[in-house]
Image (cartoon, rainbow, N blue to C red):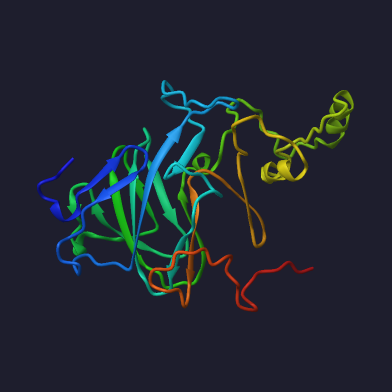
Amino acid sequence: MYHPHSDEMVQMAMGMMGMFIVHPKDPQAHRVDRDFCFMLASFDVEPGTYTPNTATMTEFNIWSFNSRVFPGIDPLVIRRGDRVRVRVANLTMTNHPIHIHGHTFKVTGTDGGWVAPGAAWPEVTADIPVGAIRCFEFDADAPGDWGLHCHKSHHTMGPMGHKIPNMMGVQQGDLAKKISALLPGYMYMPMGENGMAEMQDMAAMGMALPENTLPMMTGEGPFGPVEMGGMFTVMKIRDGIAANDYRDPGWYKHPKGTVAYQID
């Protein structure tokens, strides 16, 4: 996997565990303040099983960053003003448009080497091909909590059924009462009438998930359910973070008057 024309940026995918990165001899070459790495992987793990189905070619149900899914993924903790590089390597059998909020970036590196500055262009999404690596860089000039995720909607979800009818807008309250009467001792909760945030209420209501599986979407934010899973994390950009401090600073405290609110 060594490329003779990119010896400054030799990168190798090491199984499912991470990257092996050789930095330039000159520490000032391609310098950034924070350098993050993501390995994209997918798994087909049926509920109740503990071994991924390695024969699956299309319908995977676990989409992961570094073999982890949101909200079990560390945030990208960044000091305001830092120059940030994100390296993304794709081990899956489909492409992934990786998107960030709040900033624009430039693709600065590929498997073939560094991109000449004059050839880079501003973007908010970089498509990562199968078996490929892309590096993008940006200046973290906007404090706050900003999403970083795959732009394929089902890649920001956990295990789900593919043959379930669409129940959006269908009133299910009366039906739920009738079904509950037929299942004494069990809790029945219909989902999908107003969206899928109900998935996050399952644990809170005492509804047990099947063994060895995940909710389709989960995570709680400062304003309620985040409604994400899979290939999703948060860039937490703050003032006053020390150079080597990657501890989670918690949710962003919005300045007074900057949060939208409902009016009559």
- Number of dots carrying numbers: 0
Image quarter where the N terminus lies is top left
- Residue at x-position 51% and y-position 43%: 230
In the picture, measured across the screen, residue 133 lies left or right of residue 59, that is left
206 vs 27: above or below: above
- Foreground residue among 152 and 210: 210
Q: Position of residue 260 (x, y in %)?
A: 66, 69
51 vs 222: above or below: above
- Residue at x-position 63% and y-position 30%: 211
Q: Quadrant of residue 208?
A: top right
Q: Quadrant of residue 78?
A: bottom left
Q: Position of residue 157 (x, y in %)?
A: 55, 41
Q: Position of residue 209 (x, y in %)?
A: 68, 34
Image quarter where the C terminus lies is bottom right
Q: Position of residue 39 (x, y in %)?
A: 37, 45
- Foreground residue among 142 and 233: 233
In the picture, measured across the screen, residue 231 lies left or right of residue 228, that is left
| Residue at the extreme top | 55
In the picture, measured across the screen, residue 251 lies left or right of residue 231, that is right
- Residue at x-position 32% and y-position 41%: 129
94 vs 99: above or below: above
- Residue at x-position 51% and y-position 32%: 61
- Foreground residue among 117 and 166: 117
- Foreground residue among 188 and 175: 188
